[in-house]
Image (spheres, rainbow, N blue to C red):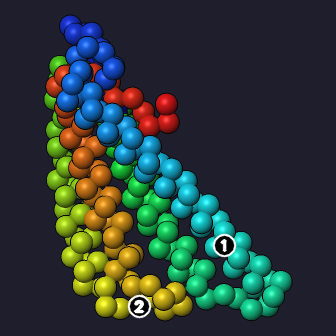
Amino acid sequence: MAAQPLASAPLHTPTTSITTGFLSYYFGFHAWLSRLCLKLAVFGLIVILGAVLTQIFGRYVLNNSPTWTEILALVVVLYVACFAAAVGVRDGRHIGMESLVSYLFPSIRRWIEIFVFLCMIVFGLCMSWGGAVLGIAMMPYLNPGLPISQGWSYLPLAIGGILISLFAIEQIVARFLKVEVTPSWH
């Protein structure tokens, strides 16, 4: 859900005078962090592509399939999904009931959006906690075929949950200040 301007208040961007000082740094840091997550997700997609192409080359050309490529692709896809999901929360591209909410009065819509972002904060913190617990529990075990700990497979849940919570808090701050959060790709 993208931030909608209220009928009685003008919409500002984070660069206007309403967000000077600390708030300017706050929104700027989140924009930088979001772009970093987006770049890491794209890099992860390139790594997955490389692993899959290596697997295809090894299987059909060399007739000797490398065992590490599938595990690497599975681990990296978790990082890609969690980073991209966090960026989706910041940019307002998450799954929501926008079709129903868009018919409501702007003041009611704003409070429903805030409620949805509060739920995302709870979800992100639970996801982070669960990912951290699983990651710590699985650190002693190695992945078969790739000599890294299985705990690395759960680390993106912990990181992604924190990022989702941070970006949801940013959206709530933006709703209260009646500012629009600039999407990551701009």
Say which amino acid is labelled 1. Answer: Val
**Which residue is at a point 71% across and 72% down the rendered structure image?**
53
Q: Position of residue 25 (x, y in %)?
A: 27, 32
**Which residue is at a point 44% across and 84% down the rendered structure image?**
148
Q: In the figure, is residue 2 to the left or right of 65? A: left
Q: In the figure, is residue 186 to the left or right of 28? A: right
The quarter holding residue 169 reads: top left
Query: In the figure, 180 relative to 134: above or below?
Result: above
**Which residue is at a point 43% across and 51% down the rendered structure image?**
37
Residues 175 and 17: in front is 17
Residues 177 and 96: in front is 177
Q: Position of residue 77 (x, y in %)?
A: 49, 66
**Which residue is at a point 33% across and 34% down the rendered structure image?**
28
Query: Is tag 1's residue or tag 2's residue first in the polypeptide sequence?
Result: 1
Q: Which mark is residue 142?
A: 2
Q: Tell me the element at label 2.
A: strand
Q: Position of residue 124 (x, y in %)?
A: 24, 56
Q: Which residue is mark 1?
A: 52
Q: CA distance from mark 1 to mark 2?
A: 21 Å
Q: In the figure, is residue 25 to the left or right of 58? A: left
**Residue 110 shows in this picture:** no
Q: Tell me the element at label 1.
A: helix
Query: In the figure, 92 relative to 85: above or below?
Result: above
Is the residue under label 2 in contact with that under label 1 (CB below 8 Å)?
no
Q: Residues within 10 Å of mark 2 (few under 14, many from 20)?
A: some
The quarter holding residue 81 reads: bottom left
Query: In the figure, 100 relative to 44: above or below?
Result: above
Query: In the figure, 148 relative to 107: above or below?
Result: below
Q: Residues within 10 Å of mark 1 (few under 14, many from 20)?
A: some
